Amino acid sequence: MKKIPILRLGRILLVSIQEDLTDNEAMQFQSDLVNKVAEIEALGVAVDITALDVVDSYMARVINDTASMVRLLGAEVVICGIQPYVAMTLIEMGRDLIGADCAFNLDQGLEMLRERIAHRGDIRFTGDGDE
């Protein structure tokens, strides 16, 4: 079973899904990420799906549900790098990513997270990776 690495940048978590996941791997990713958010009291999560050419309805639901769970724990979340074909397919399926905002790439996603965290006035985050 593939394990998706979860990288930590201060109080922000970075996740890059590089290949299609089985249903079990998707659920393990969800569990791992939500637990890590709680463990470090993350302020933000960036999920990069640039490498995915296809997102089926199940994976879209997992991403959406994961984003909702992360928000319930108090962290901001941004999905980065949705490919045009994936966006068109998701809309055609009637599935959108309501639980998360989207950015073109990881740089924009991190900037969105930093702005949101700063807007919340969270003094635990300085924007440079320090705690």
Image: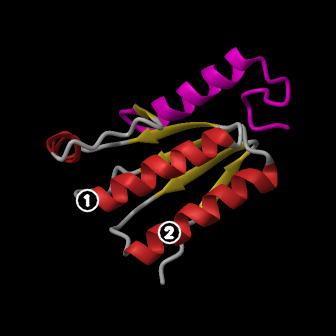
Q: Considering only vertical position in the picture, is 35 above or below 78?
A: below
Q: Considering only vertical position in the picture, is 99 above or below 122?
A: below
Indicate the quadrant where residue 92 lies. Answer: top left
Q: Is residue 99 in the magenta section?
A: no
Q: Which amino acid does label 1 sit on?
A: Asp
As drawn, is 39 to the left or to the right of 92? right
Residue drawn at x 77%, y 17% as measured from the top left:
121
**Quarter of the C terminus within the rendering:** top right
Residue drawn at x 43%, y 60% as measured from the top left:
17
Residue drawn at x 38%, y 53% as measured from the top left:
61
Label 1 – label 2 distance at C-alpha? 14 Å
Classify mark 2: helix, strand or loop: helix
For the view shown, which residue lies furthest in the bottom direction? 1
**Residue 118 in view in this figure:** yes
As drawn, is 3 to the left or to the right of 48? right
Closest to the observer, 120 or 8: 120
Circle count: 2
Classify mark 1: helix, strand or loop: loop
Circle 1 sits on which residue?
A: 56
Closest to the observer, 36 or 114: 36
Q: Which amino acid does label 2 sit on?
A: Met
- What is the x, y in percent for residue 73? 70, 43
Q: Earlier in the sequence, mark 1 or mark 2?
A: 2
Circle 2 sits on which residue?
A: 27
Question: In the rendered structure, which segment of residues is drawn in magenta?
Answer: 103-131
Residue drawn at x 74%, y 32% as measured from the top left:
128
- What is the x, y in percent for residue 20? 33, 68
Label 1: few (<14), some or many (≥20) within 10 Å?
few
- What is the x, y in percent for residue 16? 48, 56
